[in-house]
Amino acid sequence: MTPTDSTSRLPGFYKQSLAERGQTVAAWAGLSAAQLAALDGSGGLTPEQAEHMIENVVGLHALPLGVAANFLVNGREVLVPMAIEEPSVVAGASFMAKLARAGGGFHAHLTAPEMIGQMQILDVVDPAAARLRLLSEKARLLDLANQIDPVLIKFGGGARDLEVRLLDDSPIGPFLVVHLIYDTRDAMGANAVNTACETLAPTVEQISGGRVHLRILSNLADRRLARARVSIPVDALAFDDFTGERVRDGIVAAYAFAAADPYRAATHNKGIMNGVDAVVIATGNDWRAIEAGAHAYAARGGRYTSLSTWAVARDGALSGTLEMPLAVGIVGGATKVHPTAQAALKLMGVTTARALAEVIVSVGLAQNLAALRALATEGIQRGHMTLHARQVAIAAGATGALIEQVAGRLVAEKVVRSDRAEAILRELTAGGA
Ligand code: MEV
């Protein structure tokens, strides 16, 4: 079985044991024993490998790795690895992906893997004239940039464009900024872009007559936008006493709150990032870069707002969209050296950065829907509490079967607190003590 010819619907997956789940996904995606070991925690990154990644290494830091089922992205069945410590996220994504199947799943695309490198030019005598001189030398500068990395050129990447901006309301007065637009293909691209900016700087100084100060990529990767849309038939939204129309309209009203209010938009977008970051981390990508890009993009109009939209379609379906910068790669950096990241990519069946971004933006939209659906109906705490209760039970010292017993009592009593968990645990273990 491969990810393309088998369904990502895995009924009862959540009820399987930890070991069974590993076997299920390994069989589903054709993982090798080493790849499965990288996912199930018996293998994966070693301290010796970590030693070569950062400084002063003393060990490793682990996170739970879950797999979200049910995703259909651009007609392709996908199992999604998610590294996250927060309960409800994996379940929420899986559940919404299941609902989305009724409307054909998620449709996603990436604009282009183009990053922006910035060069700040100070001490320019006549910035307006220098700007035009730089623009008139665009071809020479792009040519120079394209000599740096023949491998990138071979794969169809390289310098695409050069823009020159005059920033005139800075605290130190006007200065010029060059933007080098650089197609980094399957790489996130920070190294390639930073190298290109540093290489171009002396020539930019010559042409502008100024001094190039900063040379660094921008995380506002608004030339590398990932977009996803989903349509959910209204009937698929109904549950318990809630009609589909009520759920749908509640979600649209919840979105309107985020669209109009930065205080709500921050939380709304945080819910999107719950899904996005979990996949970004599982695949070894730079989640700080993705966070920075997302929030800067959300504020691009001068007021921070929602990254997603929700509306009622002509046929009455709930229609959602998400658009955000997504600078993720599958080559270079931790993506290449981290065995779990490699296994995560294999599980997803993605072989390009574009396909990875398309899955991630779909997960972000699913996660947003999960949060809004809960908030607009029964509230977030009910689903949250069951899972949160388990963590509280573990923190109180419960192990094995006692975890579920203590958590079950906490939820039934609607008191999910550590002191109560400790008391229940004492009670349950009193006989055997
Ligand atoms: C919690 O991690 C995320 C939510 O707050 C998102 C939202 O409010 O939309 C539930």
Image (cartoon, rainbow, N blue to C red):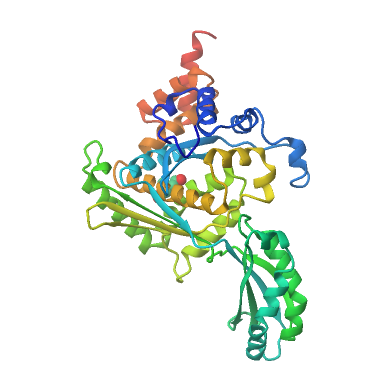
- Residue 222 appears at what percent x and percent y? 53, 66
Kindly give the residue lying farthest to the top in the view shown: 432
Asked whether residue 416 appears in the rendered view, the answer is: no
- Residue 165 appears at what percent x and percent y? 59, 80
Front-lying residue, 221 or 24: 24
Asked whether residue 282 appears in the rendered view, the answer is: yes
Quadrant in the picture for residue 350: top right
**Residue 210 in the image: above or below residue 374:** below
Residue found 21% across the figure and 43% down from its top: 243
**Residue 240 in the image: above or below residue 408:** below
Q: Quadrant of the C terminus?
A: top right
- Residue 44 appears at what percent x and percent y? 66, 34
Residue found 35% across the figure and 54% down from its top: 320
**Is 318 on the left or on the right of 126, as rendered?**
left
- Residue 239 appears at what percent x and percent y? 25, 38
**Residue 240 in the image: above or below residue 197:** above
Front-lying residue, 185 or 228: 185
Front-lying residue, 110 or 410: 110
Quadrant in the picture for residue 377: top left
**Is 126 on the left or on the right of 249, as rendered?**
right
**Is 12 on the left or on the right of 157, as rendered?**
left
* Number of numbered callouts drawn: 0
